[in-house]
């Protein structure tokens, strides 16, 4: 998983100003990832405000990374089934935000996760919940 630190293996994450810095697993399968988001010009409208779709891209990536951190062997997320994103505050170009994704529940074929972007005052700027399809490798333990 270390190879996915930084842009998460997706150039768009880095281009938007996102970076995944640490990850881990709490308990048996509650994966998490933490990082930062310093909005790049590409992420913002002409007024310096981050577009809603950018929040969704980053939050989706954080949830996927958290799930993958919890999976073993060659098991990986296959696709996002559903995602709901809420924006509560504006994110602006000149600030840096904390990005975090966490697994809520990991089942055999489906995972549920949530992610947040928070400001320096620890206020939620945006958050998302998602449901993800899991690909289990036939040779992995527990399949």
Image (cartoon, rainbow, N blue to C red):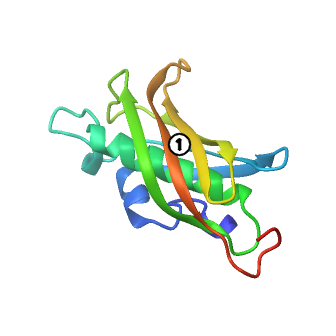
The residue sitting at 41% across, 66% down in the picture is 11
- Residue lying at the far bottom in this picture: please name it: 139
Residue 57 seen in the figure: yes
**Residue farthest toward the left in the current orientation of the protein:** 46
**Where in the figure is residue 143, as x and y percent of width and height?**
76, 71
In screen coordinates, is 27 left or right of 5?
right
User: Would you say 86 lies left or right of 62 here?
Assistant: left
Residue 45 x %, y %: 18, 39
Q: Is residue 92 left or right of residue 124?
A: left
| Depth order, front residue of 127/43 | 127
**Residue 41 x %, y %:** 26, 47
Question: Pointer 1: what residue?
Answer: 36
Image location of residue 116, percent across then percent down? 52, 33
Q: Quadrant of residue 134?
A: bottom right
Q: Pointer 1: residues within 10 angstroms few (<14), some, or many (20+)? A: some
The quadrant in which the N terminus is found is bottom right
Residue 100 seen in render: no
Seen in the picture, residue 103 relative to 97 is either above or below; the reply is below
Which quarter of the figure has residue 14?
Answer: bottom left
Kind of element beneath mark 1: strand
- Residue appearing at x 50%, y 60% in the figure: 7
The reply, left or right, for residue 5 in relation to residue 10 is right
124 or 71, which lies in front?
71
Q: How many marks?
A: 1
Residue at 68% in and 77% down: 137
Q: Is residue 67 above or below residue 53?
A: below
């Amino acid at each position: 998983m270390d190879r996915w630190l930084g842009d998460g293996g997706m150039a768009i994450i880095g281009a938007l100003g996102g970076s995944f810095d640490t990850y881990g697993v709490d308990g048996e399968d509650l994966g998490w990832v933490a990082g930062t988001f310093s909005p790049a010009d590409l992420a913002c409208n002409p007024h310096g405000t981050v577009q809603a779709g950018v929040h969704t891209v980053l939050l989706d990536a954080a949830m996927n990374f958290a799930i993958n951190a919890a999976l073993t062997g060659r098991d990986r997320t296959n696709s996002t089934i559903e995602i709901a994103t809420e924006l509560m505050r504006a994110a602006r170009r000149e600030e840096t935000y904390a990005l975090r994704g966490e697994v809520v529940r990991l089942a055999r074929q489906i995972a549920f996760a949530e992610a947040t972007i928070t400001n320096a005052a620890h206020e939620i700027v945006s958050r998302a919940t998602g449901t993800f399809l899991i690909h289990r490798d036939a040779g992995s333990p527990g399949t």
